[in-house]
Image (cartoon, rainbow, N blue to C red):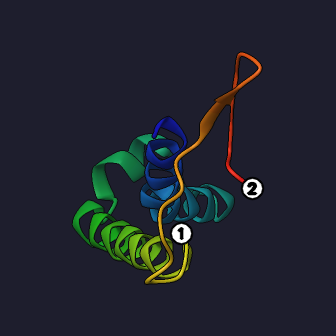
Amino acid sequence: MLRVFIIIALVFSLPLVTHALWYRLRGGSMDEYVQKAPLLVLSLAGALLVFGLLITFASFEGEPPGKPFRPPILKDGRIVPQD
């Protein structure tokens, strides 16, 4: 779950970081950037990216529908998936 949270946080911050790097490479100061950054637009762009990521996770993760669930078993003191 922590991995998913970290991925979502990175994807959400991607537009802000990209825009800040572009602004800095263009020659602007970071103090100026903090005051003039289009935070609402960048936040919406990040939210759209996260939404797309969640749709992708939901579409391509897991087993196909209808396949029975086979829980892991305890074998020789270790939890292993069923074959």
Front residue (pair 44, 30): 44
Residue that appears at 64% across and 65% down: 26
Q: Position of residue 24 (x, y in %)?
A: 61, 55
Helix, strand or loop at disc 1? loop
Badge 2 is on which residue? 83
Q: Quadrant of residue 80?
A: top right
Quadrant of the image containing the N terminus: top left
Helix, strand or loop at disc 2? loop
Q: Type of residue at label 2?
A: Asp
Q: Position of residue 4 (x, y in %)?
A: 49, 49
Relative horizontal placement of residue 39, taking residue 33 as reference (left or right):
left
Relative horizontal placement of residue 64, taking residue 50 as reference (left or right):
right
Image height of 26 relative to 1, above or below:
below
Badge 1 is on which residue? 62
Q: Position of residue 21 (x, y in %)?
A: 61, 57
Distance between mark 1 and mark 2 Cα atoms: 17 Å
Q: Position of residue 17 (x, y in %)?
A: 53, 55
Q: Type of residue at label 1?
A: Gly
User: Of callouts 1 and 2, which one flags the residue occurring earlier in the amino acid sequence?
Assistant: 1
Relative horizontal placement of residue 78, taking residue 4 as reference (left or right):
right
Residue that appears at 55% across and 78% down: 60
Image height of 63 relative to 14, above or below:
below
Residue that appears at 31% across and 58% down: 36
Residue that appears at 48% across and 36% down: 2
